[in-house]
Image (spheres, rainbow, N blue to C red):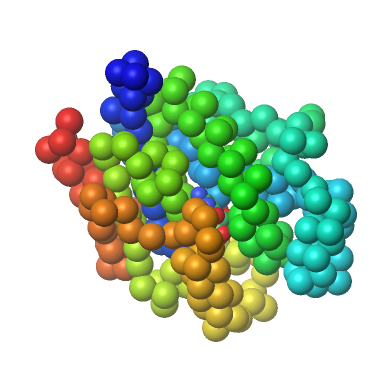
């Protein structure tokens, strides 16, 4: 029992809503501490990508959700591997390494069906725990401190105002896709919708772990957030 729980000493969880900056901070923190960063959202995105490859985008997210449920597509039928290479998380579907293709708006609109599904949550949690047993990890997501690693000693909840989160996402889209016809108000609505979905899902919902340190990044630079986290961690380690 003791050995099994030992690995939790080396797990740092960062939960928070879309656009709060947790992935960026988790990456910086991992580099600083010599830990490995796991982006759990990217694994949900990868399974969504795998399902899209199988059934297509269809006419709407709702139709996609209906077909996904009707065809009972379970995660075991996909050969998805998550591992580290040069300290970076790699996600591979068959022989395809997944990166930018996971971050499109069309895919994001369809994640809900996969993230709400118990088989996929179970599978992703298993992947995360397997990695955490083997590596010291900083893992970001929605339910890391509450459901996946409730016994981890170091938990943070990273938040920011809806305006700041929408602005960050907007800038990300402009930079990545060189599109400037995106409406920031539309992005704000998308984020609000996803907040609703994330907070109200039956299992794995986004919530603040009881023993988490809450950080609002709305008015802080990345380096300020990083230093804040390091200060908290130094006090605890
Ligand atoms: O980057 P962004 O914050 O937009 O999202 P993400 O972290 O890549 O996660 C994408 C979606 O996966 C989220 O909106 C959640 O619905 C879902 N997710 C989840 O259900 N549980 C997690 N631990 C991580 C992500």
Relative to 50, is 77 above or below? above
| Number of marks in the rendered image | 0
Most extreme residue toward the front is 1
In the image, farthest residue toward the top: 3
Q: Residue at the spot x=36%, y=73% of the render? A: 161
Q: Position of residue 62 (x, y in %)?
A: 76, 71
Image coordinates of residue 164 in percent, x first then y, are 40, 72
From the top left corner, tell me how far across and down residue 1 is, in percent: 34, 19
Q: Is residue 124 left or right of residue 132?
A: right
Question: At x 23% / y 50%, what residue is drawn?
Answer: 211
Who is closer to the viewer here, 129 or 224? 129
Q: Quadrant of ligand 1?
A: bottom right
The quarter of the picture where residue 32 lies is top left
Q: Is residue 208 above or below residue 83?
A: below
Q: Residue at x 29, y 28 (%)?
A: 9
Q: Is residue 226 visible?
A: no
Residue 78 seen anywhere in this rendered image of the structure: yes
Left or right, 234 with respect to 2, comes to left
Say whether residue 211 is left or right of residue 45.
Answer: left
Residue 178 appears at what percent x and percent y? 66, 64
Residue at 85%, 54% in the rendered image: 71
**Rendering quarter of residue 136:** top left
Q: Decide which of 226, 236 is in the foreground and name it.
A: 236
Please state which of residues 235 and 68 is positioned toward the viewer in this rendering: 68
Q: Quadrant of the C terminus?
A: top left
């Amino acid at each position: 029992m003791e050995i099994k729980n030992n690995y939790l000493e080396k797990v740092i969880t960062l939960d928070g809503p879309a656009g709060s900056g947790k992935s960026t901070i988790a990456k910086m923190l991992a580099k600083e501490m010599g830990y490995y960063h796991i982006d759990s959202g990217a694994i949900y995105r990868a399974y969504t990508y795998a399902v899209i490859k199988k059934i297509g985008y269809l006419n709407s997210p709702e139709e996609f959700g209906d077909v996904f449920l009707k065809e009972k597509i379970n995660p075991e039928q996909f050969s998805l591997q998550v591992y580290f290479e040069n300290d970076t998380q790699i996600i591979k579907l068959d022989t395809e390494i997944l990166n930018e293709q996971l971050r499109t708006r069309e895919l994001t609109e369809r994640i809900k069906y996969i993230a709400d599904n118990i088989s996929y949550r179970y599978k992703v949690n298993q992947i995360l725990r397997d990695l955490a047993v083997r590596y010291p990890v900083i893992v970001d997501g929605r339910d890391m401190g509450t459901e996946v690693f409730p016994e981890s000693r170091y938990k943070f909840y990273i938040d920011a105002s809806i305006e700041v989160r929408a602005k960050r996402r907007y800038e990300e889209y402009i930079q990545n896709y060189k599109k400037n016809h995106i409406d920031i108000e539309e992005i704000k609505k998308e984020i609000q919708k996803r907040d609703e979905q994330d907070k109200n899902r039956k299992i794995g919902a986004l919530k603040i772990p009881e023993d988490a340190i809450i950080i609002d990044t709305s008015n802080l630079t990345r380096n300020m957030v990083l230093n804040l986290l390091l200060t908290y961690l130094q006090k605890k380690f």
